[in-house]
Amino acid sequence: MNRERKRLLIYLLLSFGLTWIWFAIACPKGKMWEDMPQEMQSFVALGMLFPVISDVLTRWITKEGFAMTDKDSMMLGISLKNGKWVWFAVAFFLPWIYTELGCIITLILNPSCYDPEYYLVLGIEKRQLYLLPVIGIISGVFGSFAAFGEEGGWRGYMMPKLMKLMPKGSALIVGGIIWGLWHAPLTLIGHNFGTEYPGYPWLGIVFMCMNCILLGIVLTFVTEKTGSVWPAVFIHGINNANPSILNGYINPEKDKLIFGVNGMWIGLLISLLFTAVVVLVMWRKKEPVS
C-alpha cells in the first residue's frame, strides 16, 4: 500500500473511530440535541476535538514528526508576509458575507418567511441586531476551540494527503464527503438541522456532505494560500457563530420552501456554491503564495 494512503487510512480510522465512540458514550441513547441542557451539549461537542487529536496520534504512529511549519507540517504557524495577511482578513469577513447572501437568497425564494419583527422573538433589540456580525466575528475567533479541533485535522492533515493521492478537484469532493459523513451522529440527533424535516436524517446527512464540499473548498484554499490552518479555523468558527443581521427577519416557522425543507438550507447552499466557484476561479488563475 502507498505510504501516504496508509497514513491517511490510519488517520481516518482514528478520526471516525474516536469521535463516534465519544458521541456514543457522551450522548444518552434516544436523547436529541434540543433536549440536552447546555452543559451536556458542550460535553458532547468535545468530540469535535478528535480530528486534530487524530492528527497528532497518526504522526506519532507513522513517525512523521510534529513540524509546525513548512512542507508536511501541522501548519500551525502564522505568517502575514507576502500578502498572506489578506487571507487572514478575508477569514474574518467572508462568513458574514456569504451568510447574509444566503439570507437574501432565502427571502427571494420564499418571501413569505419575512417577518419584520422576528428579532423580538429572539430577544434582541433592533440596535443590538446590527451588532450581530461584529459579535459573531469576535465570538467566532475567540471561541474557535471546536473549529480548531476539526480544522487542525481536516485541513492540517487529511486534505494535504488527499491532494497528494488524487487530482485537486477529486480531493476536494472526497474530502468534503468524508467531513460531512463524520458529522452523521450529530446530524442524527438534530444538532445541525433539527429533526423536523422530510427525509430525516438522510436528507440532512446528504445536505451536510454538500455543505462540507463547498465550504471545504474555501477552507482548503485559504489554508494553501497561507500555509496555515488558522484562517480556516477562523472561518469555521465565525461560520458557526452565524454572524447575520438578516436572520433576525426570517421566521423559520414560515420558512418551509420545498416539501417542508427549511429555505435557509437552500439559500446558504446556493450562497456557498457561488463562493466556492469564485474561489475555484481564483485558484486556477493564481499559484499559492510561497
Image (cartoon, helix red, strand yellow):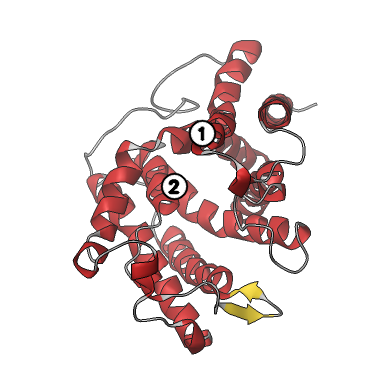
Residue 23 on image: x %, y %? 68, 32
**Residue 42 — which label?**
1
Q: Residues within 10 Å of mark 1 (few under 14, many from 20)?
A: few
- Taking depth in this image into account, of 245 and 37 the one nearest to the observer is 37
Nearer mark to the viewer, of 1 and 2: 1
Residue 93 is left or right of residue 52, and the answer is left
| Residue 15 visible within the image | no
In which quadrant will I find the C terminus?
top left
Q: Amino acid at mark 2?
A: His
Residue 288 on image: x %, y %? 39, 48
Task: Quote the CA–CA distance across marks 1 and 2.
Answer: 17 Å
Q: Going 54% across and 38% down the picture, which residue do you hit?
A: 37
Q: Going 46% across and 28% down the picture, which residue do you hit?
A: 71
- Taking depth in this image into account, of 20 and 68 the one nearest to the observer is 20
Residue 210 on image: x %, y %? 64, 60
Q: Going 73% across and 26% down the picture, which residue do you hit?
A: 21
**Residue 236 — which label?**
2
Which SS class for mark 2? Answer: helix
Give above or below for 5 relative to 283: above
Residue at the extreme right: 1
Q: Amino acid at mark 1?
A: Ser
Dot 1 or dot 2, earlier in sequence: 1
Give above or below for 87 relative to 37: below
Residue 131 is left or right of residue 248, and the answer is left
